[in-house]
Image (spheres, rainbow, N blue to C red):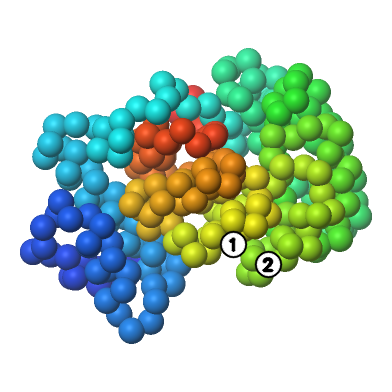
Amino acid sequence: EGGEPSSMQQLAGLIIGQDPFRIEHLWQRMYRSYFYPAGREKTHALGGLDLALWDLKGKALGVPVWQLLGGKARDYIETYATSYPTPKGGTIEDAARNCIAEGHRAYRLGPVAGREFDRFQAVQDSFKACELARKGGGKDGSWAIDFHGVWDQEDAINLARMIEPLRPYFVEDLVRGENIEIYKTIRPRLGVPIAVGEIYGAKWDTNMLIEQQLIDYARCTVPNVGGITEYMKICAIAETHYVGMIPHFTGPIGETALVHCLTATSVKALTTSSWSGETS
């Protein structure tokens, strides 16, 4: 959960022997110490070390990390389920119904496409799957879809418009993520809540999307953005623009860190519960 090993070792070399309680100082040291600004892979490695620093400080002081971040702002965090299993012989409708009955806020699905990608057929098949998810969920906001950037702009917009009456909780990663400013074009044409950010790094990647309110939810996660230190700054930026946080998970350590972060902020939040045989 900490990025590429050699980057981790390189960054660790900068902080060995330093005061581990100076987390902000160490974050800046790792991010800025080389000639080129840290790319996303290095930021991810930095994030793994940042999680370790917060964990170390919490253990040294005998308090949970959420206490260090300002204390509880909420008593529980709603979850959506990704990779939730479709029962044997059942349908997406059955899976969504079971998911909501188990206590999750929303059931999330991905695009539906055959081995040979027919863009028009994939739009129609995905729309039918969304109808089943909404029917199984039984209420507005009971389902969400990740487009995974598989469609070009016009197909993505067409599908997003088709599912608008089904009231998804969010529609994620409508197109590929290289050109952040494409949402200046996409946003005015849509009426669905947009969630973007799982592949991005530190706050500079999502700042424009949040400040110009081109998205409704930031999908940033730890450690990819640079750990807890950076994630809480992104939460603050999002809160001032009424943008919610729906973080993407990486694994059990990152997911635990997200719970601590979201516990200590009042920003609207929904996090993932990766289904792998039992409820996380």
Q: Which residue is mark 2?
A: 181
The answer to which quarter of the image holds residue 254 is top left
Residue visible at 38% across and 58% down?
226
The answer to whether residue 88 is seen in the rendering is: no
The answer to whether residue 162 is seen in the rendering is: yes
Q: Is residue 61 above or below residue 233?
A: above
Instruction: Mark 2 or mark 1: name the one nearer the start of the chain.
Output: 2
Q: In x, y percent, where is residue 260?
A: 35, 35
Q: In x, y percent, where is residue 19?
A: 11, 58
The answer to which quarter of the image holds residue 189 is bottom right
Tag 2: amino acid: Glu
85 displayed left or right of 90: left
Q: In x, y percent, where is residue 85?
A: 63, 30
Q: CA distance from mark 2 to mark 1?
A: 8 Å
Please name whichever residue, 154 or 86, is drawn nearer the observer in this view of the structure.
154
Q: Residue furthest left?
A: 17
Q: Which residue is mark 1?
A: 208
Q: Is residue 31 above or below residue 174?
A: below
Q: In x, y percent, where is residue 168?
A: 74, 35
**Helix, strand or loop for disc 1:** helix
Tag 1: amino acid: Met
Q: Is residue 242 above or below residue 46?
A: above
Residue visible at 37% across and 68% down?
42
Q: Residues within 10 Å of mark 2 (few under 14, many from 20)?
A: few
Q: Residues within 10 Å of mark 1 (few under 14, many from 20)?
A: some
Please name whichever residue, 227 or 191, is drawn nearer the observer in this view of the structure.
191
Q: Residue furthest bottom?
A: 35
Q: Nearer the viewer, mark 2 or mark 1?
A: 1
- Quarter the C terminus occupies: top left
171 displayed left or right of 256: right
Please name whichever residue, 237 or 120, is drawn nearer the observer in this view of the structure.
237
Q: Residue furthest front?
A: 240
